[in-house]
Image: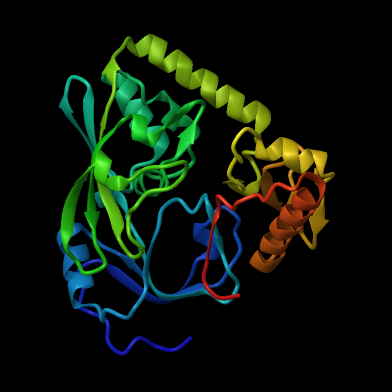
Amino acid sequence: MSTVATMPVVRGKLTANAPLGPLVWFKSGGTAQWLFEPVDEEDLVAFLRELEPEVPVMALGLGSNLIVRDGGVPGVVVRLGKAFSKIDRVDETTLRCGGGASGILVSSTARDAGIAGLEFLRGIPGTVGGFVRMNGGAYGREVKDILVSARIVLRSGEAVEWPLEKLGYTYRHSEVPSGALVIEAVFRGTPGDPAAIGAEMDAIARAREETQPLRSRTGGSTFKNPAGHKAWALIDAAGCRGLTMGDAQVSEKHCNFLLNLGSATSAEIEALGEEVRRRVEAKTHISLEWEIQRVGRT
């Protein structure tokens, strides 16, 4: 990859040619031209203000909903670490959560605070930054049902607070611009009993364990559910359950999950996904849309 002319001075960690495979669930893919792990918002803002405007920037959370292509990612990948994982209680039913906090941490904190309505986040394998950006959802609920506002650092380095309505949420989509990073979100639930909240979270965890290949190298839910349909059922009907390409496989446990059985390349995983899309369209005349983000060069 070509080198970026100059990198701003940072207080956090800035690594050239950083392998991304170990940081994503599929355990495949190339390197980031630069990987930046800022120590705080000020560090991130200063970096983006000074970074040459033509350099692309993308956020990396838990790496659960992501295929990093084998040729790597040009520009800068920003990973929000512990400094961005704090959660503060604002009032009786409201939490302010850092963009690096996981769905499990947010839902557990809400449970302990007696805040109901956030239980579904237990079923989302990602960080606040990721599921706020894509209006993540599970078990009949989605982020737009609980979000009050989000703090976003734009690619220019400007930090802005966006209320719910500005995010323009639709199914698994928001208006958060490319190159921007969600560094904080305010979620509001309703008063609830911690024991009842905990029971619902346990039920969600059990349901996921029973129906999804959680102990595998997977990217999570691969395709969006088309209106009126379940993606997994369409994939199954097209005869794709267990389909393989190299070391990539359509999960036999849940057809809307792709697996890396060991040494699959990102190219094999993505090609398998495209073959599934082709077969589903041929069988049902329905075009599946990727839910998993695919980034970088092939």
Q: Nearer the viewer, residue 177 or 287?
A: 287
Q: Quadrant of the C terminus?
A: bottom right
Residue 164 lies, with reference to residue 39, above or below; the image says above
In percent of the image, x 46 and y 13: which residue is there? Answer: 199
Quarter of the image where one finds residue 245: bottom right
Residue 10: % across, % down: 21, 72
Q: Is residue 156 in sight in this rendering?
A: yes
In the image, farthest residue toward the front: 285
In this picture the colour scheme is: rainbow
Count of marks overlaid on the render: 0
Residue 271 lies, with reference to residue 187, above or below; the image says below
Residue 207: % across, % down: 60, 24
Is 171 left, or right, of 39 in this rendering? right
Q: Nearer the viewer, residue 117 or 274?
A: 274
Residue 283 lies, with reference to residue 155, above or below; the image says above
Q: Nearer the viewer, residue 54 or 37?
A: 54
Is 154 left, or right, of 238 in this rendering? left
Q: Is residue 264 in sight in this rendering?
A: no
In percent of the image, x 62 and y 32: which residue is there? Answer: 228
Is 6 left, or right, of 195 in this rendering? left
In percent of the image, x 73 and y 35: which residue is there? Answer: 233
Residue 59: % across, % down: 38, 60
In percent of the image, x 75 and y 43: which residue is there? Answer: 235
Residue 220 lies, with reference to residue 105, above or below; the image says below
In the image, farthest residue toward the right: 239
Residue 14: % across, % down: 32, 72
